[in-house]
Image: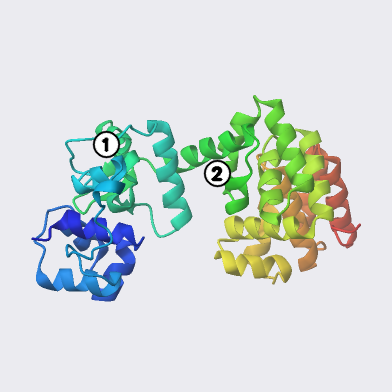
Amino acid sequence: MIDGADLRRARRYVDVTLEHLASQGGKSPSHLSRIEGGRREVTPNIVALYERVLGFRIGGPDDPSIPTVGDVDRRSALKLAGATVFGGAAVEPVVADVEDTAQWLAWEIWHRGSGPAISEAVVPIERIPAMRQLVAVRQVLRDQDGLLRFSTPGLIDFHIASRVFGGIATGRRGDLETAQTSHETDQIIRSFVERDTMAADTLGRWMRTGATPVLRVNAAGILAKLRTPEAADAVAGALRTDEGARHLYLAAVAHRVLGLAWDDALRYATTPSYTEDYAARLVNELRNPRDPAARWCSAVLLGHLNVADRDPVKAAVAENLRTEDSRENLRTMAALLAGADPVTA
């Protein structure tokens, strides 16, 4: 008789997600998760759905997901024993580190971009014991549908920052090449980088010579948060000459400050359009004390909007000229007041 563990083993064998399987059968991922976890009955219709999507008979003599005697390794044995069920297994593999698992969960939630939680069904078997510990101390919450989320949303930024900084400290670019980090995550990474001059040097090198615009803009974004005149000048100078990184940084500011969807922010970074509300928000961003590169980007966007002659803009720029400690930012704001292109002036 086929049970939920058989269904999960077969699904994972061909690397099909619960979300995809559910979409093919008019079911919800949480419903299928409960079936795989033994909390709902396995019906013939469900078995037929799995077999149709996966492309083989489950539990039969030709089921490729059933290991043979010669290839049963520890991972397969644990699967067959039901250890993939998050709720309980008698035998556990050597556990992944708890902190590493927290970082993995944060990265998965952030990278999938589908909400603040993911299904327990996607947790790799080697991370299940560590995930149980995170649930036990209530750093991670598990609901009745088997969805996992952090108890405090800010933990996502913290664990992503910890993971990214680990890569910076060891010279691994992978995470910073994958996707653009957020303003909040950069602020946390900055607190680590401030205590590690070698990490700052690595970021400086990636900002100048990184292979992709995403890597270069991520490095620039973290360095900008150091809030020293030297770092601010280096970042603004890099953005001035690096069109790809500049476009992404301008888009990030438009996304955060103007509340635009990311695709709209990318377009706005190239062809900004004037509204009184947008101009007011960008003027306010000129006073951002935590990110000199965001101040630089705001000045660039305002320059492209041709609003330098408006009183609120002139007042904000005049105020910043008295307090700004970055020479590159002073240069850019002076160009803005003069009606020149802030990037090329």
Q: Which mark is residue 184?
A: 2
* Residue nearer the viewer, 286 or 161: 161
Residue 1 visible, this angle: yes
* Residue located at (84% from left, 51% from top): 332
* Residue nearer the viewer, 57 or 33: 57
Residue indicated by mark 1: 132
Q: Is residue 167 left or right of residue 119?
A: right
Q: Quadrant of residue 55?
A: bottom left
Q: Is 25 rendered above or below residue 231?
A: below
Residue 58 in the image: state x and y as whole percent. 20, 65
User: Coloring scheme of the render?
Assistant: rainbow
Q: Quadrant of residue 195?
A: top right
Residue 93 in the image: state x and y as whole percent. 29, 35
Mark earlier in primary sequence (1, 2): 1
User: How far apart in space, not on screen, are marks 1 and 2 (Cα)?
Assistant: 28 Å
Please say if the residues under marks 1 and 2 sit with CB atoms less than 8 Å apart.
Answer: no
* Residue located at (63% from left, 56% from top): 252
- 10 Å crowding of disc 2: few (<14), some (14-19), many (20+): few
Q: Quadrant of residue 115?
A: bottom left
Question: In the structure shown, which secondary structural element does the residue marked by tag 2 occupy?
Answer: helix
* Residue nearer the viewer, 324 or 243: 243
* Residue located at (66% from left, 41% from top): 222
Residue 339 in the image: state x and y as whole percent. 88, 62
Q: Amino acid at mark 1?
A: Arg
* Residue located at (56% from left, 34% from top): 166
Q: Which mark is residue 229?
A: none
Question: In the structure shown, which secondary structural element does the residue marked by tag 1 occupy?
Answer: helix
Q: Is 192 rendered above or below residue 50?
A: above
> Which quadrant of the rendered structure holds the C terminus?
bottom right
* Residue nearer the viewer, 153 or 62: 62
Q: Is residue 179 left or right of residue 210?
A: left
